Image (cartoon, rainbow, N blue to C red):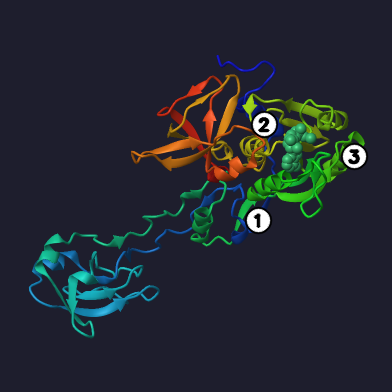
Amino acid sequence: MQNIKPGLTTLSDALEIAFKEVGQRTDVEERPLSECFGAVLRADVIAKVNVPSVDNSAMDGYALRFVDLADVDGPLDVVGSSMAGHPFDGEIPTGKAVRIATGAAIPKGADCVIIQENVTANDDETIIEINPDVIARTKRDQNIRRAGEDIKKGAVVLAAGSVLRPQDVAIAAGQGCQTLTVSKPISVAVFSTGDELAKPGDPLPPGGIYDSNRFAMIGMLKNIGCTVTDLGLLADDFDVLKDALGKAAKSHDVIMTSGGVSVGRADLLKPVVDQLGEIHAWKLAIKPGKPLMRGKIGDCLVLGLPGNPVAVLVAGLLFAVPLLRHMMGADRAQSKPARMPVRAGFDFKRGTGRREWLRAQLVQNDDGEHVAMAFNSTSSGMLSSMVWADGLIEVPEDCGQISVGDDVLYLPLRGLQ
Ligand code: AMP
Ligand code: MG
């Protein structure tokens, strides 16, 4: 049994519940390949053609019949060529060679390719000589890529639920696809809340701060293919928040906010969502990001992220992004972040009961070993820690201490963003 702070839900439980309650959307569209990067594929892609489509050469050289090599005791005639897109016409005659380029079709009858570096050719490449050592080393099928050895016709080359990377879109193009069936983008309205906030470009009032969170939110959302409406800043005022959220909920799938979800007097987001709709979850056993809120106004999902800049990113990348990816049809494995074991290069002590993420960098220590170093502060107000970090170290709920040399879990930020 994990030692969880009373009244808090673990991140895993909160995500599982949210996955179920929010569900997956069914609206899909056919999108041109070059606009599919980062989108969620919603229909399997089945290979329509073998890749390679025919047996072809892996190298530049000379194609011949392997059995003929046993009888070679002098120069060989080169009877023609097979170039990429221009195959040799007909069958290779016994005892002859055909000049061949990388990717070109293997002439009928040939079953090995000797690379050009191992051959001496005359000036017009009509006669070659092959060194006996090379002949002794040559094997049948050498330097031949067989038809279908990369992709067999009928195979599932991409599975529904994949988040499309460059190589995924490329393999679809290799099958002649012009479009892919992907999720329609989710529309998200984004607000920052707080009386202390100023828009970048406006003068900074005494004690004020520029609104940075809105840009962290917009970035995370755009990276996963959402359509974002930037609705700017909202004051800590019940009626202002109620009016803005009520309107945005009518025309968006999701509202994402920052700030105003704690327990202070100016934290009005929860009462506003409570009045306009329902609160489904509030307060997770996580650090930073504890006051994260999930609710609903009509059919619109509301994600209230905390105000502290690191909390916005951590709660955003570990809760909001997986949930929105799931909503868009991503499969489980791709909805959740990758975690990899690394060795700690730092000491750390804390009170247990929440899962915590330390900002981390992978570095090489004096012994040449790769270890994770933690930022020198755990303050969730220090955005510079997220800029410094290349990843996060995950500290499990029950773990109160990390010592140099311990195995810890590292989440690469690049894999999250
Ligand atoms: P709150 O959750 O609204 O109490 O905010 C917690 C902390 O985060 C406060 O110190 C805020 O000033 C800061 N903060 C809130 N919103 C933003 C924002 N949009 N950009 C930068 N910092 C913020
Ligand atoms: Mg606030």
State left or right for residue 262 relative to residue 34. Answer: right
State left or right for residue 294 relative to residue 59. Answer: right
Q: Secondary structure at mark 3?
A: helix
List x then y, in percent, for residue 205. 83, 46
Residue sitting at x 60%, y 51%: 38
Marks 1 and 3 sit apart, C-alpha to C-alpha, by 39 Å
Residue sitting at x 59%, y 45%: 387
The N terminus, quarter of image: top right
State left or right for residue 117 relative to residue 384. Answer: left
Q: Amino acid at mark 3?
A: Val
Q: Secondary structure at mark 1?
A: strand
Judging by the rendered image, the residue that carries numbered circle 1 is: 30
Judging by the rendered image, the residue that carries numbered circle 2 is: 289
Q: Are marks 1 and 3 in contact (CB under 8 Å)?
A: no
Looking at the image, is mark 1 or mark 3 earlier in the sequence?
A: 1
229, 129: nearer the viewer: 229
* Count of numbered marks: 3
Q: Dot 1: within a 10 Å radius of its alpha carbon, few (fewer than 14), some, or many (20 or more) residues?
A: some
Judging by the rendered image, the residue that carries numbered circle 3 is: 240
The C terminus, quarter of image: top right
Closer mark to the observer between disc 2 and disc 1 = 2
Marks 3 and 2 sit apart, C-alpha to C-alpha, by 24 Å
Q: Is mark 1 within 8 Å of ligand 1?
A: no
